[in-house]
Amino acid sequence: MTHGAYILGCAGTALTPDEAAFFKEARPWGFILFQRNIETPEQTRALTDALRASVGWDAPVLIDQEGGRVQRMWPPTWRAYPPALDQGPLGARAMYLRSRLIAEELRTIGIDTNCAPLCDIARADTHPFLRNRCYADSVAGVIDLARAVVAGQGDGGVLSVMKHMPGHGRSQLDTHKALPVVTESAQTLRDTDFAPFKALAGAVGMGMTAHLIFEAFDPDLPATTSQVMHGVLRDEIGFGGLLMTDDLSMEALSGSVADRSRASLDAGCDVILHCNGILTEMEAVATEAGKLSALAQTRAEAALARRQTPDDVDMAALAAEFDALLASQGASQAR
C-alpha cells in the first residue's frame, strides 16, 4: 500500500466533505491535530476515526502534547503539566510518569504519536518560544529525561518523534517567524547540540528537523532543506528512522509550500509535515511531494512496527505518584 509523502492537518473539529474526498485521493501517510481540532474526548475520537477511515487504514495521528505551553488538550477535560524545564530537576521518574499519563490521554481519543521528546539543550539565550520546553541545560540531563519520555510514551502505546534535529537550543529567534543562524564550530555542535540526538538515534523511529542554518555545515540553507545537514543526521548522528520536516507553514522557510516540499525531499527528508489545514496548500504539497520513496516506505513501516499495546498499570496510582512529586517540588521551592 503506497502512501503520500506527507502528514497533514485539517481545519476544524470534524472533517468537511471536501477534506474527506481529498484525503481519500491523496492518501497522506499520517495526520496531525492542533487545538483547533479538539473540543471533547468524544468529538476528538470521532475525528481520529474519520481521518483513518478517509485513507482506509490505521494511519498514525500525531499531536504536540508536550506539556507546559505546548499543549493542544487543556483542562478541565485534560491535565495541565508544568513547563518541562521547571519539572526537569525532579528527574527521570517524574518525566516518565508525565509521559505515561500523557500517553493515556492520547490513546483514549485515538492519537498514537506524540511529537516529543525534545532533545534540544536549553541555554541562557535560547529564544523564549522554546527555552522552557527544553528538559535541561546539559547534554547528560537532556539525554536522561528524553529517554524517560520515550519509555513513558512507549509503555502507553504512543510513538515518539524526536525533535528538533540536529538541535534548536542555540536559536535566538522564533522559527515560526524568522530563520535563525547558528555560528558555532562543527566540533562544538557535535559535542553539545548533536549529542542527545546521537544518544537516542536508535531508540526512536521518527525524527523532526529544525529550521535553522548551521553555518559550519551549510552557510546558506536551513537543516530542513540542506543536503549537507541530512548527511549529518544520517551519517554522523546515525539516525536511521523516518525523518519528517518541521511544519512547512513556518516563516523560517522561503518559497511556496510546493517549493519547500520539493527542497525538503531533495535534501533527504522522508515526509513533509504541513499543519495549518488550508486545503489549497495541502493540495499543493500533495502534488509536489507525491508518494513515499521506497526507502521512506521502509522507514515508515519500521517506525510503525514500534507500536506497543499499552501496559496494564494502575493509572490512578501513577497519577498520585506524579502529583506527590510535583507537590514535593513545590514545597521545596517554597522553603
Image: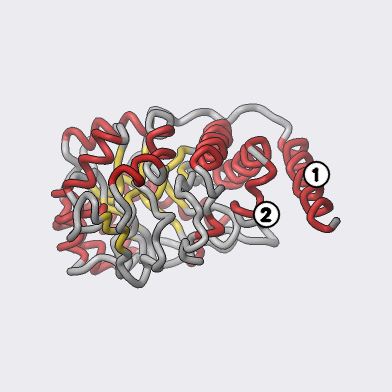
**Element on which disc 2 rests:** loop
Q: Nearer the viewer, mark 1 or mark 2?
A: 1
Within 10 angstroms of label 1, few (less than 14), some, or many (20 or more) residues?
few
Amino acid type at image mark 2: Arg
Label 2 Cα crowd, 10 Å radius (few <14 / some 14-19 / many 20+): few
Q: Quadrant of the C terminus?
A: bottom right
Q: Residue at x 24, y 43 (%)?
A: 270
Residue 191's quadrant in the figure?
top left
Q: Give the camera-side residue of 186 and 273.
A: 186
Residues at circles 1 and 2 in contact by the CB criterion of under 8 Å: no
Report the residue at 30% width, 50% height from top: 185
**Residue 13 in sight from this viewpoint:** no
Q: Quadrant of residue 8?
A: bottom left
Residue type pointed to by label 1: Ala
- Can residue 312 be spotted in the picture? yes
The one nearer the camera, 313 or 39, is 313
Image-based side of 191 in relation to 287, left or right: right
Q: Which of the two discs, 1 and 2, labels the residue nearer the N terminus?
A: 2
Q: Which residue is mark 1?
A: 324
